[in-house]
Amino acid sequence: MDLTPIIDGFGVVLQPENLLYCLVGVVIGMLIGVLPGLGPAATIAILLPITYGVEPVSAIIMLAGIFYGAQYGGTITSVLLRLPGEASSVVTVFDGFAMAKQGRAGAALGIAAIGSFIGGTVSILGLTILAPVVAGYALDFGPPEYAALGLLGVLLVATIGNGGKLKAVIAAAVGLLIATVGRDTFTGAERFTFGSLNLADGIDFVPIAMGLFGLGEILYNLEQNHKKVHAPAKVTRVWPTRRDLKDSSGAIGRGSGIGFGLGVLPGGGAVLSSLVAYAVEKRRAKQPERFGRGAIEGVAAPETANNAAATSSFIPLLTLGIPANATMALMFGALLIQGVQPGPQLVDEHPDLFWGVINSMYVGNILLLIMSIPMVGIFVRILKVRPAILAPITALITLLGVYTVRNSVFDIFLVIVFGVVGYLMKKVGFEPGPLVLAFVLGEMIESSTRRSLLLFGGDPTGFLTRPISGTILAVIVAVVLFPLVRRIFRGSRPAHEPAAPSTPDASGPADQADHPDHADHHGTRETTEAR
């Protein structure tokens, strides 16, 4: 393995300008992680217009910092206030707040910071080793392979992501439909433009992202009833004891592996990783009843896993051009805005960006480890700002931002329309992630499919004659059939066989009894995202 590009990547990230953008990104990410409502996807969507005037490497370094920095921030309020700032920190509430009630808030925050740093670092090392290898194999990809891979990415997010599967498939189908609006690149015919010149070139990614994730999220969260923020638990000794480190070492190791593995898969991500890591630790424990009553492993495992997953989700984006989740779909859009096409050619065509972004994560993780504990007091004060004050300011920034991209009033109209659509989707239980992901992959799927059919003389069975595309299509069939087979298998169980324990039990009896409303602060949003 040639280490020269990796070393050059450190030269890129250690430039003062890029270090500043890395710092700005992780600080904004921590702030967003602390504040309930706006997640990293919404924040990245709102900040997309800013990236137009910034160098591509600096812009992506900042946006990446926002993403993995948000995983750190959500921990602080989960432990101190029983208020998850991020969906991926929901599981941390169970034992983190219980530890805070026992006067061990500092230990919980300390082990969360250490686990997050280790999980993130392990994942970055895996990214450094695995990404070039995957990109090398992906150089053999042609239009048939990209068509099949794009379809698999949409399908996986729709079937194993958060929320109801049918609703996710419907949202993805709508996203694919929106991607067809505009002039056909093959024939020049106009599709779904309704005679409007504004739609002739298609719908831009920025208004869709800023509407669904920005304005839609603001409207939805304003409607939720947020309870008054309680006084936070007192933080005394931050560094965990030797026994704490020993007890949580296994959980941190397993959480790193779980997070890295699930983060790579489309539809996995930080939320699923934290849930699985917590469930694994509870199942392995000799005394599972400790979980929900202040078990330090119940904090270490999910916090390690969600940070590892946040980093490893960059692998399919940078090497294959396939976003693994909604936030990665926005990163995909940000790269396209900069004139950079994510995929296997990225390593060779833009090595400064590829290795600069990866190596910036080492620096970002160190910055987060240093800042996470000293800034606790500031974050708790920020929580006291009422949503009614923050929401109109954020909405104004969103509308001004989208106007500055193309100086188009029509784009403001689109943001408002998609903001209302995003709000209504959240109300009825539809997640906007599959829609945005399908939209960004729609053009690639369509153009690759049509090029493939030209290569095969119009014969669709040609996809099966190529080893890679045939294998991917076989995986697609397996993904579609697996839920049906599982349902048939469950239906054939004997009536007396007990059902498998469900995820909500992970909170433990003590937590459920003492805190029946532990998710009230997030209302429907938390329930939907963590489902």
Image (tube, rainbow, N blue to C red):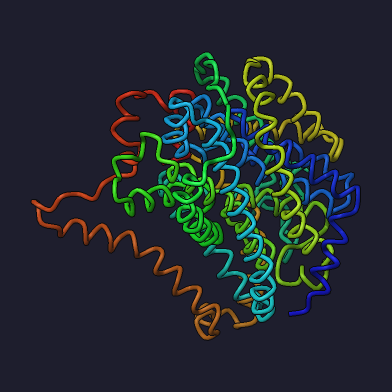
Q: Quadrant of residue 524?
A: top left
Q: Is residue 106 above or below residue 7?
A: above
Report the side of 163 relative to 352 (left or right).
left
Q: Quadrant of the N terminus?
A: bottom right
Percent x, y of residue 477: 41, 69
The structure residue drawn at horizontal position 60% and vertical position 76%, both measured from the top left corner, is 144
Residue 176 visible here: no
Q: Is residue 272 above or below residue 465?
A: above
Percent x, y of residue 52: 85, 45
Q: Quadrant of the C terminus?
A: top left
Of residue 175 and residue 502, the one placed in the foreground of this image is: 502
Percent x, y of residue 196: 75, 41
Of residue 427 and residue 311, the one placed in the foreground of this image is: 311
The structure residue drawn at horizontal position 89% and vertical position 44%, both measured from the top left corner, is 53
Percent x, y of residue 164: 40, 45
Residue 435 visible here: yes
Report the side of 302 relative to 50 (left or right).
left
The structure residue drawn at horizontal position 83% and vertical position 53%, both measured from the top left corner, is 338
